[in-house]
Amino acid sequence: MIGQSRISRIIAHLALILGILIVAFPIYYTFVASTHSLQTILRPPLPLLPGKEFFANYYQALFGGIGQIGGVNVWTLLLNSTIVALGIAVGKIVISILSAYAIVFFRFPGRMVFFWLIFITLMLPVEVRILPTYKVMVDLNLIDTYTGLIVPLIASATATLLFRQFFLTIPGELVEAARVDGAGPWRFFKDILLPLSATNIAALFVILFIYGWTQYLWPLLVTNRNDMNTIVIGLRKMISFADADTQWHLVMVTCILAIVPPVLVVVFMQRWFVRGLVETEK
Amino acid sequence: MSPRVTFPNKLLPYLLVAPQLAITLVFFYWPASQAIYQSTLREDPFGLDSAFVGIDNFRRVLADPNYVNSIQVTVIFSIATAVLAMAVAMFLAVMADKVVRGKGFYRTLMIWPYAVAPAIAGMLWLFMFNPSMGTFAYMLRSAGIYWDPLLNGPQAMFLVIVAAAWKQISYNFLFFVAGLQAIPKTLVEAAAIDGAGETKRFWTIIFPLLAPTTFFLLVINTTYAFFDTFGIIHAVTGGGPGKATETLVYKVYNDGFVNLILGESAAQSVILMVIVIALTAIQFRYVEKKVHYG
């Protein structure tokens, strides 16, 4: 480009490298800590390079018997997080694609009322109505269940709005052609709408998976039993900065285990994720 | 828009919206109306007795110095987090826009923190900066600075702000990169031919043209700082020391679940709902405006 010197490009590269160092450093440093022994971690400063305890620490955290985190092993927590994140992502996509389909491709009394009923919930994140929602959970006996962890979080207007916007761009001729060829609503949905929405679904899946995995307040409230904790909550329970007994090297391993799955999802599905994020949230 | 082609079914559409509607009613409308109802009641902590008190709960909440404090904390926290996260992200995005090679590589490394849970982000920073074993705390002490975020309010605030902003950099970065790509290169080149230097081009052309993106991100970041950072505060400071980092959402949680002051906690929820609705309305006005910019 005109007006851009070689030097300014080099400066830009240097700035970006510095930026990445800052952005990635906390994660890298946690990884470094997870490869050192407890004694090394407790004696600052911690070295900048990984230590020799990688296999020992990870083996102990993953297979070192039960009882690491309140009597529960890491696998259970990871499994819980995976179930919750997948449940929220899939559940949200399914119910919102169905309701958006109804609102765009059918005419029925009450259509706009339903649309607004759903739309208004955009303005009510779970954080602002925690106590009454918690009470509903207690009344429905949903404390310490996967249903209780997942279902309240899958009702949100964002995904419905996104699908609605996308469906509105599908030309009416396509619907007409399908009907002329004798396709019913189900056939149209399955053979035309779903394939067309594939990119949107992929993008949304990544965003919602991260959303589910990183939930904190809700899992904290609706789980009492340790074996129903997600890994983020379990991690919080492992840490006590005042307590000398905290197994820091294992905490660090658990930290890395809690970070890696969502990071992998984001990095590997980057293309859809970035497109979906930047296009949808406007 | 011409009338859409639709399917003639009568019953099917109701079945299709039913799941979402059911969940919305049970987990949104019912609790929200309960919150409003409860905010007009005073209940003893055992839930045995309650009395209608009108807007008395609101009056008490708004007159409570602790609540006023938590408003202040929230405002400082949100502004600092949003400004810090956006400034760093904008700088990095402008730099990324300049480089020709390695764009994808930089982006891949930059989006990591997006996938990190806020609570874990808080723990990572606390690990580096906690007074007993944090490496950076050790360095600060060696440099002669008294550092103890577990006892010193402003330092605790600083720590949660940095952790919250750090997590948000990736998100802002992606949007700024997209915003920068939408700016016509011809404008920037024309200015360059007219002799404007890089700094001048940034402030007179790029920055104003980025304004829609910046404003959108400002709303998103504020909402994030209000609500999504509960995990950071709960994991890092627990609202302390004292009440130095007690944000509005944290106070709702603390009063409702720890201190069991139900009526006032519900009143706080209702106030929060009003704030969210205002933020959302601003966001939508902006979306309308943006159409003009094209």
Image: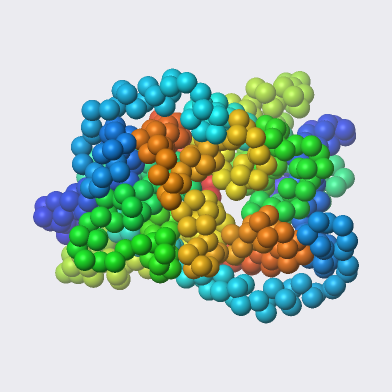
Q: Is residue B281 left or right of residue A79?
A: right
Number of residue marks = 0
Q: Is residue B54 left or right of residue B140?
A: right
Question: Residue at the spot x=72%, y=59% of the render?
Answer: B260
The answer to whether residue B255 is seen in the rendering is: yes
Q: Residue A127 location, x and y as percent?
A: 64, 54
**As drawn, B84 above or below A176:** below
Question: Residue at the spot x=77%, y=48% of the render?
Answer: A135
Which quadrant of the structure image shows residue A142? top right
Q: Residue furthest front?
A: A244
Q: Nearer the viewer, residue A190 or A203?
A: A203
Q: Residue A115 location, x and y as percent?
A: 75, 48
Q: Residue A174 location, x and y as percent?
A: 66, 31
Question: Residue at the spot x=53%, y=53% of the render?
Answer: B234
Task: Tell me which colouring the rendered structure shows.
Answer: rainbow
Q: Residue A215 location, x and y as percent?
A: 56, 43
Q: Nearer the viewer, residue A171 or A41?
A: A41
The answer to whether residue B5 is seen in the rendering is: no
Q: Is residue A123 left or right of residue B45?
A: left
Question: Residue at the spot x=72%, y=76% of the render?
Answer: B60
Q: Residue furthest bottom?
A: B63
Which quadrant of the structure image shows residue B270? bottom right
Q: Nearer the viewer, residue B178 or B229?
A: B229
